[in-house]
Amino acid sequence: MKAFQGRVVAPGEVRAEAVVSHGGLNTLASFQKALQFGDKTATCGDQNNPDLYGRQMAGKALCLPQTIGSTTGGLVLYCACAMGRQPACMLFSRPIDSLAGAGVIIADVWLKDSKMPVVDSLGEEFLNYVKEGMTVTVKEGGVVEVE
Amino acid sequence: MQLTKEQQQILDGGKGEVMAKVMETVIRYGELFGAGRLVPVTSKYNHLVTSFGLKMMTPVFDLMQQLIDAGVMSEQKFSADPRPLDPKVPKNFLQNLIFNKFMYSKQSFYEDQLQKLGLMDQDAFTCTCYMDAVGNKPGKGDVLSWAESSAVVYANSVLGARCNRNSGIIDIMGSIAGYVPEFGLLTDEGRKASWIVEIKTTKKPEAQLLGSAIGMKVMEDVPYVKGLDQWIGTELDDAACSYLKDFGAATASNGAVGLYHIDHLTPEAKEMGEALIREDARVYVIDDAELQRVYDSYPVIWKNLDAKPKLCFMGCPHMSLEQLKTWTDRVEKGLAEAGNKKVVIPTVFTAAPAVIKEFEATEYAARLKATGVILSYICPLMYMNNPLCGKMPVITSSNKLRTYTTARYYTDDEILAQITKGGAKA
């Protein structure tokens, strides 16, 4: 087990199985099909992301460097949260980007029951260490344990 | 964050609960990125990325309705991304059913919401709102609250405006608040380049391929591109602007670039030159082999790799007037060489409604129509995003469309050969 310290973007505690994207997560490309066509597991539809393509994202600890791509990214994330198809948590190795940051803040301000803890700035070592299928625990204060 | 008395009063509910939430959203968004203050939005118009009445966006429509019901409106009018449907674009019975009855069943409802919220006019639907004919073209130094990655990167880089890569919803929140948080690309420091890109190709690089290579390499960083001026010149004429439109869209969709500088060409690079480059900037050299490597790396997810294309889309982002004219000439010439009268693959060129009107007033319009090419205001990306199109062999020279859909990428020359002769060889 190893613990990493990051910055709390959205508070909360959760324990979930990791899915890992070593490249940037294209939010629109990843979530669109799942949200549009009733896939409650939110299967990643981004053909350009070999780490995540075809993997379930809903309910998982989504570990990533940042999000990329279309500026619909934040609202797609907001929709995923509103529809209950969001990851259990999002864990960024880098400081969060403006699209994901927007989605997280909009969900936190405008949705009553959006529970998706988000921690950023966990460092490159975090993304090197965490592997798909590992158990990730998000604790208070931005502590993330991986085992 | 340091707030003015007026901003604090709004946050405290002085203009109602919904307006307070709008202000809270903008402030918390800024705090996340270390913004010390909010600065006024100074552009005449805003631009929204959300134009499509997709059923999956019901949570967004609910939020918009809260704004409308509370009378919380922006003082700015706005343009919005392209419409997802156009009867002129070929579709079969099933597609028609799915588009109208299922996917975009909220289109009329959402367009009505946009009208209430301040749409510029009922044809203000395009991702290239900065075209002269459309009229939403910010000036140098203007502070924007735009979203739409291709428009933001163009406004920052080619027009010298200042805008972060805002997400949808944040775009309208900043516009309603009248303020955006000052961080990132709104600051002088944030506009400095942390990558030097050296172009060492033996011919003019394909805009969409070059942008893709740079986007995938630098991700969200600012690149300073050297050596491109030898291929596209040192003046922002129509051809250079069209090139940069496509180049920028690829940097933004294949990576997360919000601003690039082109040595001797874009406004800040012309003014400040290499003073825009950070001391610790990394170097990325692009030659013919690197572009080929990037091209070869694109996955093709058609079930049958040898399938005959059923549709070709050009214009993601929407084509400029200059591109429509140039491509009319190219298609005519290609057809003449091949001994064909009309394109051999159903082909759709897309452009802003106002640009289409401008084009239709020229002699080129009848000539393009005679080639069989369909001219549409549609958003190819939104058209493509459904299971039926996913199975359809569609080709494009747009790297943005390739990234978000199952469309297969070809260079401009290959696309020309495909649609005029059949087969990708020029």
Image: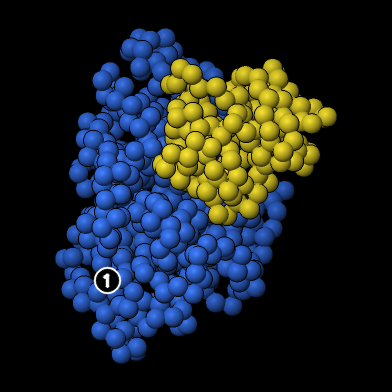
Chain colours: A yellow, B blue
**The N terminus of chain B, quarter of image:** top right
Image position of B314 (left or right of B298): left
The x and y percentages for residue B37 are: 51, 24
Looking at the image, which residue is at 83% across and 29% down?
A1
Q: Amino acid at mark 1?
A: Val
Tally the marks.
1
- Residue B130 seen from this side: no
Question: In the figure, B277 relative to A135: above or below?
Answer: below
Q: Chain of mark 1?
A: B
Identify residue for label 1. B373
**The C terminus of chain B, quarter of image:** bottom left
Question: In the figure, B287 relative to B284: above or below?
Answer: below
The x and y percentages for residue B321 are: 29, 64
Assign a secondary structure to mark 1: loop
Looking at the image, which residue is at 69% across and 17% down?
A140
The x and y percentages for residue B292 are: 61, 71
